[in-house]
Image (tube, rainbow, N blue to C red):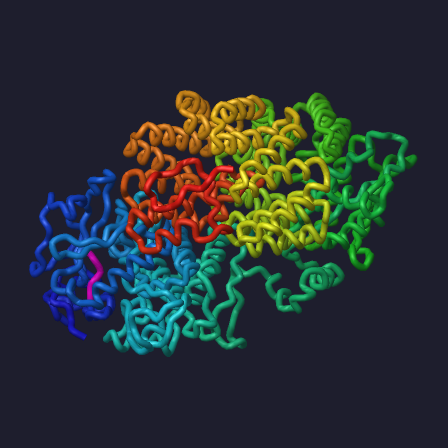
């Protein structure tokens, strides 16, 4: 290898030393060369602020290829120079990397630059630097890429060590970037702090895929070649053996180690010794080097640094998941890392980390029996050990008095007190009633026997049955908790001699005793204090609230409202009743009333239990303020403190979905199903989240399981149909819609929408129009008809029926003004030449709370500008929209605009993103109304883009197959090279 003829900066004091120096002239520190990158051309330094005099920099103001104006020299490395430049065509800043002149004629170096462009284009993610183009100017070869106004991680490490929380958040974003790369079968191979950029907002971007390779190709090097940066190499790289994605995770571990401790591991006197060291022994754990490093983070690092790849994390997603838990952004307060075998002491000397719960020991029991048998063993042995999750179903308390005020009154208070324990989750009594009615039709009560049947079917661990009786000395309240599967009694409790005013307090006291029996070590006095939020209310108010709950769950919303209003009339401080009123009004779509009662609930939040406080705030941000990030904060705090709260997990998954963080939505949704594996709504949510995330095979599989559990559950057929359609199985999609159609009125309405969507997808416009007209008539003037009317307007416009299309759009808006109706209606107006009406809708949306209305307002404004030929303004508007939300529709509109701006490279990148994120095209409005018709135009425009790029595959790619490319868009560009499709 030929050493670089460049100054070497000391890693310790930052002094610039002469080329070839072994030690620093100032501090005598060893200049090991560990930070240099080994490439096919030899050694190269990362692009930094030192510029060797031997390399002639481009002058500021120089314009390359008539397009890129050089503004500032950013840094220089052994491979070339990086500049900040301005793209004069698109009026934006870019980073421009120029290959060193003496290397630009070497085929291997040019191939490396092309490799960087090709592979980086494959990886589309917000945490990966976007590569735009490869160009040449007067013999110079260059790459243009996204410009990040920030600093690289290496320069930040020069200044300080990172706080654990900050380091974890940065590494988590690097994990997301690696997850995206590895998902495209791309290995980075040179992951190091110099290749990680952080902007002022804290957003991380991984860059420099110059050494990346695809595991599906032979790559640029033969087995035995050692490529990368020595300080951050994996043992596999050091040995020159074949690599997989786990090599990048080792490099990630070294970066994390350096951020937490201020030093890199595997220090040695020479580069060779350092490389040899990492193949033979693990480094000291970060917590040994710096005792203030949290044990969980130290364990995460050491698992990344396992010498054997099989002992490491197996994916970047696994690392990110453990970081989520430690950071509190995912359910579970414990990070239970299984350390690599090389990095731990022998069993005799091993001690349990302080942060691991004692219950971890119980996890060593057989996995197949862990759910029920291990928990039972804890209940029937002493002392009590807190299980990780206990699911409980509270049966109806039997009212043996003649006073109806006790009917259904004690169960809510008992449940609230019981769920004060973080590991207990109470199964929905309304869901249990519904299932019980299916198991034993006509049964008047959810008694213990029916509750046990429901529990066995749903996988619930414990059933609680209770009663209240009137005695001469007062009231007696009794309960019995049983193992749902065996019927064996866990505990019995009773309270005697209670006056009427003390019944609720006595109920809470028994809940505290049951919590202790199940493993809660919270003192009973604290449990009672935590439940005072309910017991302070009058018995009559509690009864009215309980009635409201039953009516709401039965779908009798107006009667439920009356009951809740009675409850707050009897007890104006009953905060949970206001929260329930807000929820009912939200279901009714009455947003003003929803906001009114949520605010009243928030004003009385101190009258709620801790669990209810988190839930109330989370739902307030989710449903009223539509502030998804705040909702995520509150709901993450909820499941961090109460990891068994299945409802909290479901709402957290929903918040991630609305924030368009689909991997997290899917992950959290799965956590909820692990608590209640047979809950059809939770499992169907997993099917939907998998579909939105583009995993159509998993979605279809989950949906089929839901249908097997509950053949009449309508929305499972929706996930199945769309997932089949996305996989090119049109007939199976149609069959799923047909099965849905025969279930009930809702199924028939959704099936009509789905079948029309399928017809539009296949270009059968006349069929689509007939289906929609029939469906609209069946829906009458119901708001659900509005979606069909916007679809009908699209079909009519595509068939040249502009007046009819405008009338359909008008009628849709008269029924429903939600953004999922307003946006497609506005697009109809724009295409039909009624831009003023579209602008009106945009103005209305811009005045609403939440990111979604703001997003659609900007998209409509951009559509209007594009129609008027104001391409640059349209591009800026769509870019502003992307800052509001990284939505699929934004990428589609950006791509179209780049194409109009004659920037096919950028257009191609955006269309490529649309294809990679095609799962999101099934829910462009974040709803579960059947839709895949927005996706086919991507192929049409991609054909135009490839045509503009003069790609030889343009003709084939325009319409890859009749099944895959149903191009049914009304925008047809003459001379595109793609034949116009006839309109039916």
Q: Nearer the viewer, residue 144 or 767?
A: 767
In the picture, measured across the screen, residue 681 lies left or right of residue 257, that is right
Q: Is residue 45 magenta?
A: yes
In the picture, measured across the screen, residue 876 lies left or right of residue 845, that is left
Residue 38 in sight here: yes
Q: Residue 699: percent from the left, percent from the top?
A: 58, 52
Q: Is residue 584 above or below residue 31?
A: above
**Residue that appears at 65% across and 66% down:** 367
Q: Residue 386: percent from the left, percent from the top?
A: 66, 56
In the picture, measured across the screen, residue 151 lies left or right of residue 542, that is left
Name the chief secondary structure element in magenta.
loop
Q: Report the label total.
A: 0
**Residue that appears at 89% across and 34% down:** 401
The residue segment tinted magenta is 44-48
Using the rendered view, name the quadrant where residue 758 is placed.
Answer: top right
Q: Residue 814: percent from the left, percent from the top?
A: 56, 21
Using the rendered view, name the quadrant where residue 593 is placed.
Answer: top right
**Residue that appears at 40% across and 49% down:** 958
Q: Nearer the viewer, residue 32 or 385?
A: 32
Q: Residue 494: percent from the left, percent from the top?
A: 82, 45
In the picture, measured across the screen, residue 169 lies left or right of residue 349, that is left
Residue 289 in sight here: no
């Amino acid at each position: 290898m030929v050493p670089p003829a460049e100054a070497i900066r000391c890693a310790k004091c930052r002094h610039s030393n002469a080329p070839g120096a072994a030690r620093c002239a100032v501090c005598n520190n060893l200049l090991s060369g560990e930070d240099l990158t080994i490439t096919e051309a030899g050694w190269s330094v990362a692009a930094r602020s030192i510029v060797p005099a031997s390399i002639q920099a481009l002058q500021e103001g120089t314009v390359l290829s008539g397009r890129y104006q050089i503004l500032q020299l950013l840094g220089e490395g052994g491979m070339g120079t990086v500049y900040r430049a301005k793209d004069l065509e698109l009026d934006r800043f870019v980073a421009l990397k120029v290959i060193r002149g003496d290397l630009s004629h070497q085929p291997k170096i040019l191939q490396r630059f092309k490799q960087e462009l090709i592979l980086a284009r494959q990886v589309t993610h917000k945490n990966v630097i976007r590569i735009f183009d490869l160009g040449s100017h007067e013999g110079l070869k260059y790459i243009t890429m996204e410009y990040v106004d920030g600093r690289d991680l290496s320069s930040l490490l020069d200044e300080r060590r990172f706080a654990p929380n900050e380091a974890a958040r940065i590494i988590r974003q690097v994990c997301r970037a690696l997850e995206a790369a590895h998902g495209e079968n791309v290995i980075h191979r040179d992951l190091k702090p110099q290749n990680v950029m952080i902007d002022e907002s804290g957003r991380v971007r991984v860059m420099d895929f110059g050494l990346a390779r695809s595991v599906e190709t032979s790559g640029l090097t033969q087995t035995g070649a050692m490529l990368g940066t020595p300080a951050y190499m994996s043992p596999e790289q050091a040995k020159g053996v074949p690599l997989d994605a786990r090599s990048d995770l080792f490099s990630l571990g070294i970066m994390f180690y350096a951020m937490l401790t201020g030093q890199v591991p595997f220090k040695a006197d020479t580069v060779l010794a350092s490389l040899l060291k990492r193949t033979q022994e693990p480094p000291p754990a970060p917590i040994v080097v710096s005792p203030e490093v949290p044990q969980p983070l130290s364990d995460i690092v050491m698992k990344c640094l396992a010498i054997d790849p099989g002992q490491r994390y197996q994916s970047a997603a696994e690392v990110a998941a453990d970081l989520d838990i430690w950071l509190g952004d995912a359910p579970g307060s414990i990070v239970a890392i299984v350390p690599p075998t090389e990095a731990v002491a022998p069993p005799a000397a091993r001690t349990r980390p302080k942060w691991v719960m004692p219950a971890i020991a119980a996890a060593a029991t057989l996995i197949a029996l862990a759910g029920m048998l291990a928990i039972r063993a804890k209940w029937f042995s002493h002392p009590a050990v807190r299980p990780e999750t206990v699911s409980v179903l509270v049966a109806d308390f039997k009212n043996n008095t003649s006073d109806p005020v006790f009917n259904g009154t004690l169960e809510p208070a008992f449940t609230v007190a019981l769920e004060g324990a973080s590991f207990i989750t109470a199964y929905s009594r309304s869901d249990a009633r519904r299932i019980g009615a299916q198991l034993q039709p006509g049964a008047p009560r959810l008694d213990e026997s029916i509750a046990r049947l429901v529990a066995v079917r749903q996988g619930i661990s414990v059933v609680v049955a209770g009663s209240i009786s009137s005695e001469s000395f007062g009231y007696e309240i009794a309960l019995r908790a049983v193992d749902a599967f065996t019927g064996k009694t866990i505990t019995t409790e009773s309270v005697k001699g209670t006056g009427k005013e003390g019944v609720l307090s006595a109920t809470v006291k028994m809940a505290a005793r049951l919590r202790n029996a199940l493993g809660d070590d919270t003192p009973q006095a604290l449990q009672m204090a935590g439940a005072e939020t309910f017991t302070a209310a009058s018995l009559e108010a509690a009864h009215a609230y309980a009635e409201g709950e039953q009516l709401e769950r039965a779908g009798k919303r107006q009667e439920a409202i009356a009951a809740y209003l009675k409850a707050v009339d009897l007890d104006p401080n009953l905060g949970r009743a206001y929260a329930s009123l807000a929820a009912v009004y939200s279901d009714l779509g009455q947003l003003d009333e929803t906001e009114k009662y949520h605010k009243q609930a928030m004003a009385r939040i101190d009258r709620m239990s801790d669990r209810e406080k988190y839930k109330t705030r989370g739902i307030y941000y989710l449903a009223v303020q539509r502030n998804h990030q705040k909702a995520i904060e509150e709901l993450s705090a909820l499941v961090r403190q109460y990891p068994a709260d299945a409802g909290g997990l479901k709402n957290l998954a929903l918040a991630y979905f609305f924030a368009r963080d689909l991997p997290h939505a899917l992950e959290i949704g799965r956590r909820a199903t692990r608590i209640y594996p047979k809950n059809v709504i939770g499992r169907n949510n997993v099917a939907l989240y998998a579909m939105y995330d583009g995993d159509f095979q998993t979605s279809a599989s989950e949906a089929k399981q839901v249908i097997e559990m509950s053949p009449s559950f309508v929305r499972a057929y929706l996930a199945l149909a769309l997932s089949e359609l996305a996989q090119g199985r049109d007939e199976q999609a149609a069959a799923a819609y047909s099965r849905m159609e025969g279930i009930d009125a809702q199924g028939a309405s959704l099936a009509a929408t789905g079948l029309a969507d399928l017809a539009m997808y296949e270009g059968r416009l006349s069929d689509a129009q007939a289906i929609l007209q029939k469906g609209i008539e069946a829906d009458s003037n119901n708001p659900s008809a509005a979606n069909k009317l916007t679809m009908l307007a699209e079909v009519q416009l595509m068939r040249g029926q502009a007046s009819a299309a405008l009338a359909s759009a008008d009628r849709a808006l008269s029924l429903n003004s939600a953004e999922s109706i307003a946006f497609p209606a506005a697009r109809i107006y724009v295409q039909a030449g009624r831009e003023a009406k579209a602008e009106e809708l945009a103005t209305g949306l811009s005045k609403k709370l939440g990111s979604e209305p703001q997003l659609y307002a900007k998209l409509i404004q951009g559509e209007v500008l594009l129609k008027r030929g104001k391409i640059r303004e349209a591009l800026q508007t769509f870019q502003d929209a992307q800052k509001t939300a990284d939505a699929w529709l934004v990428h589609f509109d950006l791509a179209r605009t780049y194409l109009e701006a004659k920037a096919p490279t950028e257009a191609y990148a955006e269309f490529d993103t649309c294809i990679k994120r095609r799962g999101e095209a099934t829910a462009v409005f974040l709803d579960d109304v059947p839709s895949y018709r927005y996706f086919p135009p991507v192929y049409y425009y991609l054909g135009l883009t490839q045509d503009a790029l003069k790609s030889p595959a343009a003709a084939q790619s325009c319409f890859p197959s009749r099944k895959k490319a149903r191009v049914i868009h009304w925008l047809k560009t003459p001379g595109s090279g793609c034949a116009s499709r006839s309109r039916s």
